[in-house]
């Protein structure tokens, strides 16, 4: 029988011009794994929150939401639903943690529901073992990595033994390895315990292969409902090309190269993609661009076609760190330990590494927001600490990880004008309007920044930073929380800025994003730079920190990282 049923659900936020949920009807069977995808603002989160009444947003609602036949919005009936039957893990790991250490966090929900001490101890021990948390049960929650925090959130929900698990973009804040581990844990819960999983997600490479059913939402309605391979074909063939960006890399490459597409052959995972590509490459070997004494190698063609030169020719680094060290307290290990790094003019450097590797700390130090305990930072040959804050503003711009932290005004127009006023001279209003036009924000000038979508907020924050006319742009996880369509728009904007001469230093967990944009990549580990090189040198040598396309084709094209690299070498 169905576990959940939605009947003709409508919902609108207060004073909204349109519905956030627009006539959704849906049945979800017990034990299924349902993946919900769609662009930012399409209604995914709002729909999930309607499946847990305690988290339903304020607004005008009509229709029914039923759990095992019980109307979840009828107070007389909801008493029949056991507490903890429906659990939810949210996007931001910190937003769900309430206690000081891991043990207290696991106990919190059980104590609030009135479980006795023997039951609490038994369930806590089982969760610690199942999630392999024994060694850090007494660790402070604010000292955990992003992956550990999200695992604690999940364990805190699962300890209540839910029948339904709701997940709202749970991997958005995690590094690639932590994200894969988290997704495998969700798969185990679904397969081994029969927990019904309903997950909204932008990163489909790991989610699509394990989902039973896929829902695609747009403007508050469900525009597609089918299995995972049908979903892949739909996203590729749908007239609005923006859905293609949601496809896993193996599916994208297959659909771009194969002429006869069938449901049974669309690869969704690297394993399936590698098997297909081996056969495809053998059948099309005569079409491959060959390397000969008169021709450059395929690897050289990839590098030349994607990156323009000039970086190595720079004589003096624009920004240089000489053996800098930093720690937040004497009791904790150093976050950065004698780290040295150079950033040259017109370079696009991507910094990668696990959660808590020190990447954001390095950016804040480069921006002059924190000072190293040891070592020296140089900007254009001058000590960074000797440069005035006004000059730093005109030279270095920082786009923070959370763009909302940048906003202090009530409208988009006021934010841009305030940023422009920091520049000496007049004409701030005109400069603000020009920036709004450049980033397609001119129709949103009267909107409050907090009412914008994630992509719109990112564009506004970037516009405010660029009004300072910096020569160096520091980016802290610029794609975090963005849907694939917004990510493509951001890539286009940043590539244009780079071609105009802007130097970029970027921290990211998004490997595909780094592979498609950066001119150089560095991996931070143990407080220093562990490896360094061009994207092709860097990723082709890695086993985990590389793209899905590289894992698929590396035994044929070792330095191919993205779909365009492969299609470029085959006629």
Image: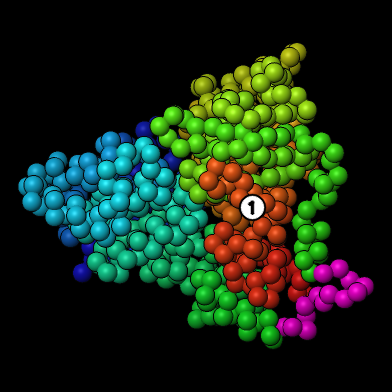
Q: Quadrant of the N terminus?
A: bottom left
- The answer, for residue 565, to whether it is visible in the render is yes
Q: Report which residue position mark 1 lands on.
A: 531
Q: Is residue 266 left or right of residue 37?
A: right
The one nearer the camera, 368 or 135, is 135
The one nearer the camera, 85 or 243, is 85
Instruction: Classify 344 as above or below 538.
Output: above
x, y percent for residue 132: 30, 57
Instruction: Classify 354 as above or below 58.
Output: below
Q: Quadrant of the C terminus?
A: bottom right
x, y percent for residue 360: 54, 37
User: Magenta region: which residues?
Assistant: 284-297
- The answer, for residue 85, to whether it is visible in the render is no
- Secondary structure mostly seen in magenta is loop
The one nearer the camera, 414 or 396, is 396
Q: Which residue is located at x 59 percent, y 55 percent?
A: 511
x, y percent for residue 88: 29, 49
Q: Is residue 223 left or right of residue 197?
A: right
Q: Which residue is located at x 27 percent, y 53 percent?
A: 134
């Amino acid at each position: 029988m169905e576990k959940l049923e939605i009947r003709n659900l409508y919902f609108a936020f207060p004073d909204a011009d349109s519905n956030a949920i627009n006539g959704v009807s849906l049945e979800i069977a017990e034990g299924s794994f349902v993946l919900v995808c769609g662009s930012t603002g399409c209604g995914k989160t709002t729909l999930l929150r309607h499946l847990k009444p305690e988290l339903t947003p304020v607004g005008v609602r009509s229709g029914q939401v039923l759990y095992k036949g019980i109307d979840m919005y009828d107070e007389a009936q909801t008493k029949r639903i056991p507490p903890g039957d429906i659990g939810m893990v949210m996007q931001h790991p910190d937003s769900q943690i309430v206690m000081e250490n891991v043990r207290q966090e696991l106990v919190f929900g059980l104590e609030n529901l009135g479980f006795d001490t023997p039951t609490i101890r038994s369930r806590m021990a089982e969760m610690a073992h199942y999630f392999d948390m024994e060694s850090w049960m007494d660790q402070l929650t604010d000292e955990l990595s992003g992956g550990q925090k999200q695992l604690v959130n999940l364990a805190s929900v699962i300890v209540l033994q839910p029948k339904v698990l709701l997940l709202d973009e749970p991997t958005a804040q995690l590094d690639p390895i932590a994200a894969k581990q988290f997704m495998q844990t969700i798969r185990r819960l679904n397969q081994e315990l029969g927990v019904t999983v309903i997950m909204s997600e932008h990163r489909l490479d790991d989610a699509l292969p394990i989902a039973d059913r896929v829902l695609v939402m747009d403007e508050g309605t469900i525009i597609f409902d089918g299995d995972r391979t049908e979903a892949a074909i739909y996203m590729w063939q749908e007239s609005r090309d923006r859905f293609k960006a949601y496809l896993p890399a193996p599916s994208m490459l297959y659909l771009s190269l194969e002429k006869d597409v069938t449901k049974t052959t669309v690869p969704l995972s690297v394993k399936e993609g590698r098997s297909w590509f081996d056969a495809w490459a053998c059948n099309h070997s005569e079409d491959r661009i060959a390397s000969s004494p008169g021709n450059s190698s395929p690897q050289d063609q990839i590098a030349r076609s994607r990156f323009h030169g000039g970086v190595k020719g720079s004589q003096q680094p624009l920004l240089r760190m000489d053996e800098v060290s930093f720690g937040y307290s004497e009791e904790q290990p150093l976050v950065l330990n004698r780290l040295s790094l150079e950033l040259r003019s017109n370079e696009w450097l991507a910094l990668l590494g696990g959660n808590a590797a020190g990447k954001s700390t390095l950016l804040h130090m480069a921006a002059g927001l924190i000072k190293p305990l040891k070592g020296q930072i140089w900007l254009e040959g001058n000590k960074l600490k000797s440069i005035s804050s006004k000059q730093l503003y005109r030279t270095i711009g920082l786009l923070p990880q959370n763009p909302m932290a940048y906003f202090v005004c009530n409208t988009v127009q006021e934010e841009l004008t305030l940023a422009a006023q920091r520049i000496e001279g007049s004409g701030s209003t005109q400069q603000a309007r020009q920036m709004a036009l450049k980033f397609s924000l001119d129709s949103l000038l009267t909107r409050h920044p907090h009412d914008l979508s994630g992509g719109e907020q990112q564009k506004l924050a970037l516009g405010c930073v660029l009004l300072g006319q910096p020569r160096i742009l520091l980016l802290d996880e610029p794609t975090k929380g963005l849907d694939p369509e917004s990510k493509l728009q951001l890539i286009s904007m940043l590539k244009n800025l780079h071609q105009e001469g802007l130097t970029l230093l970027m921290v990211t967990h998004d490997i595909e994003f780094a592979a498609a944009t950066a001119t150089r990549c560095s991996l931070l580990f143990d407080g220093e730079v562990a490896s360094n090189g061009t994207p092709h040198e860097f990723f082709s040598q890695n086993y985990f920190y590389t793209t899905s396309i590289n894992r698929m084709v590396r035994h044929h094209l070792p330095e191919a990282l993205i779909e365009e690299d492969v299609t470029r070498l085959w006629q």
